[in-house]
Amino acid sequence: MVAILGYSREQITEAVQDMYTAVAHTPDARFHFPVGAPACTLLGYAPEDIQRLPDPVVASFAGVGCPHNCGMIRPGDRVLDLGAGAGVDAILASHRVGPEGCVLALDLTAAMTRKLKDHVDQAGCDVSIIQGSAERLPLASESVDCITSNGVLNLVPDKRRAVTELFRVLRPGGRVQLADVVIHRPVTVDCHTDPRLWVECVVGATVDEDLLELFRASGFEDVDVVNRHDYFNHSPSTQTRDVARGFGAYSLELRARRGGEAPGRLRQWWTLWGPQRWPDRVRRRGLAGMLSLVAALLVCYGTLAALGLLTMLGMGVSLNETAWAGAIALFALLAVIAVAAGFRRHGSPWPGVLAAAGGAAVLYALFVNYSLLV
Ligand SMILES: C[S@@+](CC[C@H](N)C(=O)[O-])C[C@H]1O[C@@H](n2cnc3c(N)ncnc32)[C@H](O)[C@@H]1O
């Protein structure tokens, strides 16, 4: 979605601004993500909503979902559209809040905010336009009732800071409706050196579960995924579709409600990193097979080492060989199952075949003929 060519926040922010300045100036150019009216339709915008918008506004739509499917905006609300772009969601929000409410449309990119101003004037609605960053919102604390955002958080370098800012500016009980790109598998360190991934915008996206946990850890409640879209499958670029498939990238619509108090640092840490999240992290990083193998080796040699040590210390212990071999066999089998389960991810039968061969060798050595393996 955007060419992010560096690691620092400044470089990322600059690349994002360059990209969306180009989008603002040349909305008709060919992008490798769906844009305009076709994108609105495939992401589920109601036809009557699209018809109420001026054509140039719809033509510049670059969202990744339809946050209005979450239905969090109420008449009379003070709404913030975060990363408003050319203004589709901000203008729809102004229709929903009615004359008693008001809408603030914020965007990082100067060219985009100028375009937003034109579009809001064309649509004849009362929307206040602000240039600013999601990481440091120029708004008073507890000053908005609802936040809508579409395709922005994946572009923000410090997502935790941005979500903390959402919490700060919302009133207690305030609502969030958000569409964003997420990935199913974490981007590994070596992928950070792959220029294709930077260009395809996969590197900036968060793992889906991590995004939900980030909202919970920041004090949001009732965090719910309302919809998922196979967004990248609609990309006109084969490369984008391949990269997205590799990481399980898709877009989702999420809603949440701001709780009363911001949780303390320790609670935040526990929600994000506590042991309850370890099994899922291990699975998503494809480490289950490796851990099972390590467990098999530890049981195998660790038991022998412990036995030797206890004997040296004069403690007579005998080894139940059936239990010992059974535990090793169990972990070896788990390793095989984990690798075989990763078959779809590898897209090749060979890791599964190799793991099965390795597992069979271990079982043979344990139960039939140990000298063969030695
Ligand atoms: C994918 S576009 C989506 C625009 C709009 N929400 C829509 O649906 O058409 C992302 C927008 O977020 C803005 N943006 C990117 N990073 C931002 C940040 N840190 N703070 C505020 N806006 C940001 C970009 O300038 C761009 O206009």
Image (spheres, rainbow, N blue to C red):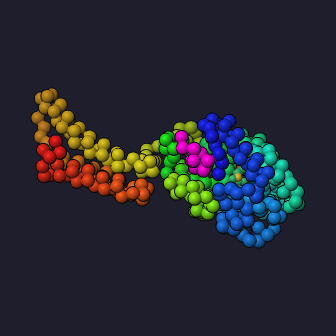
State the predominant SS element of the stretch in magenta: helix
Q: Determine the residue positioned at 36% across, 58% down.
A: 349
x and y percentages locating residue 3 in the rendered image: 65, 45
Left or right relative to 307: residue 355: right
Please report the residue visible at 13 percent of the width from the left and 37 percent of the height from the top.
317
Q: Nearest the camera: 307 or 247?
A: 247
Residue furthest out toward the top: 313
Q: Residue furthest bottom?
A: 48
* 337 up-or-down from 285: above or below: below
72 magenta-colored: no
Residue 364 seen in the figure = yes
The reply, left or right, for residue 133 in relation to residue 365 is right
Task: Identify which residue is drawn at 77% across, 71% down.
Answer: 48
Q: Percent from the top left, x then y, of residue 55?
A: 81, 64
Taking the image as shown, residue 8 lies to the left or right of residue 140, namely left
Q: Residue at x 61, y 47 (%)?
A: 199
Which residues are the magenta region? 193-203
Specify whether 364 is left or right of 194: left
Along the viewing direction, whichever of 100 and 370 lies nearer the viewer: 370
Residue 228, horizontal then vertical, whole percent: 58, 62
